[in-house]
Image: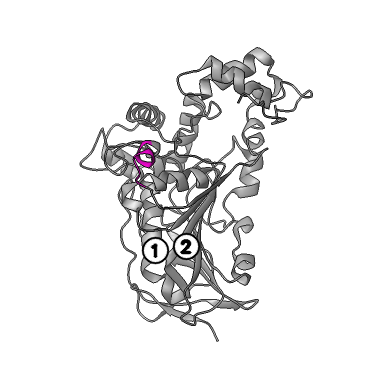
């Protein structure tokens, strides 16, 4: 017998797998280009929730290895990608801890359905696990709000994450979870998302704890940087009006997105597609909001993955033959204020040209850093 849960939009039928109730492809919102997510459309009867939903449109030819590891698992990609997945030990009214996973992928790739993110093992330990999709790349993080504020919003992907957390807040008790005991956690762009949500006023109260792995609250674009990226994207797409943007095929958007990355860079420490300080959803940089006490009372666990950056360096041929001077110049560009002193302190953490054809790797950290 399939486990069935009632939500505001309608009833869902999942599957019992290895003693865990699994609900896949649950719609938590609807997406319209560069607009805030809308509530999901209601349905009648019982909707099957046994297959993962479509992944967000994506391509990552500049990160081929990373794409194979953490890219979209499902073949289907669609702008109608706002779904989540739930693994729960039981639908018995118990209020279990809830873990909400936000996937990484440089904000341009990934999916809540990626095999690495299967929630079965954690559910066997007695927690409810939720993974989610959110809009990526230009569809999720192109900021057109300064150019056409009456038509488009910024930070669509971040708004999706907040909408998913609001869905969890409203519905997770029916899935055996405790809405007052929600932990958000993520890695890489997912860790950056977690840290950004800590500094986002609209996200407060939607989670109790946070875990940020290899991601911090300063991975956001200023309004000036966001405008520069938007200009590059519009040039690459050859679009000058809102109607042209809305009519463009997804394939054309992805192509313009890639050409924008090639023009503004991806490997200098500043991701082109990431949240932006838009003055509305993010009135201030998240790090400043956190410093002012916005996330006071939210326990935070942080960590880093030693060799994660190799995924990016493998896509950057110039990084494979860095001498000491080139390494320090690159580090300075990645630091606030193009700081040569900070680069000198950070340089000992890397090996310059450890072997022919290999990118620098984290070897040790100097005591001064």
Quadrant location of the N terminus?
bottom right
Q: Where is residue 217 drawn, in percent x and y?
A: 45, 39
Visual colour scheme: one colour
Left or right: where does residue 209 sit relative to residue 39?
right
The answer, for residue 85, to whether it is visible in the render is: yes
For label 1, the residue is: 28
Left or right: where does residue 22 sit relative to residue 155?
right
Please report the residue visible at 46 percent of the width from the left and 56 percent of the height from the top.
209
Q: Gap in Å between the C-alphas at discs 2 and 1?
A: 7 Å
**Few, some or many residues within 10 Å of mark 2 (<14, 14–19, 20+):** many
Magenta residues span: 288-294
| 290 in magenta | yes
Left or right: where does residue 262 sit relative to residue 142?
right
Quadrant location of the C terminus?
top right
Q: Where is residue 326 drawn, in percent x and y?
A: 63, 15
Left or right: where does residue 349 sit relative to residue 16?
right
Q: Which mark is residue 171?
A: none
Q: Are marks 2 and 1 in contact (CB under 8 Å)?
A: yes
For label 2, the residue is: 84
Q: Residue furthest left?
A: 150
| 98 in magenta | no
Q: Where is residue 80 drawn, in percent x and y?
A: 41, 57
Closer to the chain start, of discs 2 and 1, is 1
């Amino acid at each position: 017998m399939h486990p069935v849960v009632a939500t505001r939009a309608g009833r869902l039928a999942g599957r019992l797998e290895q003693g865990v109730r699994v609900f896949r492809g649950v719609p938590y919102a609807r997406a319209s280009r560069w607009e805030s997510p809308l509530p999901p459309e209601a349905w009648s009867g019982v909707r099957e929730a046994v297959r993962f939903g479509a992944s967000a449109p994506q391509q990552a030819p500049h990160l081929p290895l990373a794409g194979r590891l953490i890219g979209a698992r499902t073949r289907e990609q669609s702008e109608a990608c706002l779904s989540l997945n739930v693994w729960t030990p039981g639908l018995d009214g118990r209020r279990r801890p809830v873990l909400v996973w936000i996937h990484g992928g440089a904000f341009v790739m990934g999916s809540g359905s990626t095999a690495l993110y299967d929630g079965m093992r954690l559910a066997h330990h007695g927690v409810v696990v939720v993974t989610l999709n959110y809009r990526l790349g230009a569809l999720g993080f192109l900021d057109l709000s300064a150019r056409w504020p009456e038509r488009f919003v910024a930070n669509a992907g971040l708004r999706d994450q907040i909408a998913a957390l609001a869905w969890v807040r409203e519905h997770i008790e029916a899935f055996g979870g405790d809405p007052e005991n929600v932990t958000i956690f993520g890695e890489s762009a997912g860790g950056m998302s977690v840290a950004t949500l800590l500094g986002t006023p609209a996200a407060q109260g939607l989670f109790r704890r946070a875990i940020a792995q290899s991601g911090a609250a300063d991975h956001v674009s200023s309004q000036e940087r966001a405008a520069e990226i938007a200009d590059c994207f519009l040039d690459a797409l050859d679009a000058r009006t809102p109607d042209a943007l809305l009519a463009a095929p997804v394939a054309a958007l992805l192509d313009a997105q890639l050409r924008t990355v090639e023009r503004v860079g991806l490997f200098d420490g500043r991701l082109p597609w990431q949240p932006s300080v838009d003055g509305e959803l993010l009135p201030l940089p998240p790090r400043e909001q956190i410093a002012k006490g916005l996330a006071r009372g939210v326990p935070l666990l942080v960590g880093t993955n030693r060799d994660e950056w190799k995924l990016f360096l493998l896509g950057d041929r110039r990084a494979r033959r860095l001498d000491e001077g080139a390494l320090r110049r690159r580090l300075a560009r990645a630091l606030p204020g193009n700081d040569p002193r900070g680069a000198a302190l950070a340089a000992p953490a890397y090996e310059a040209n450890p072997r022919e054809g290999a990118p620098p790797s984290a070897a040790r950290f100097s005591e001064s850093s």
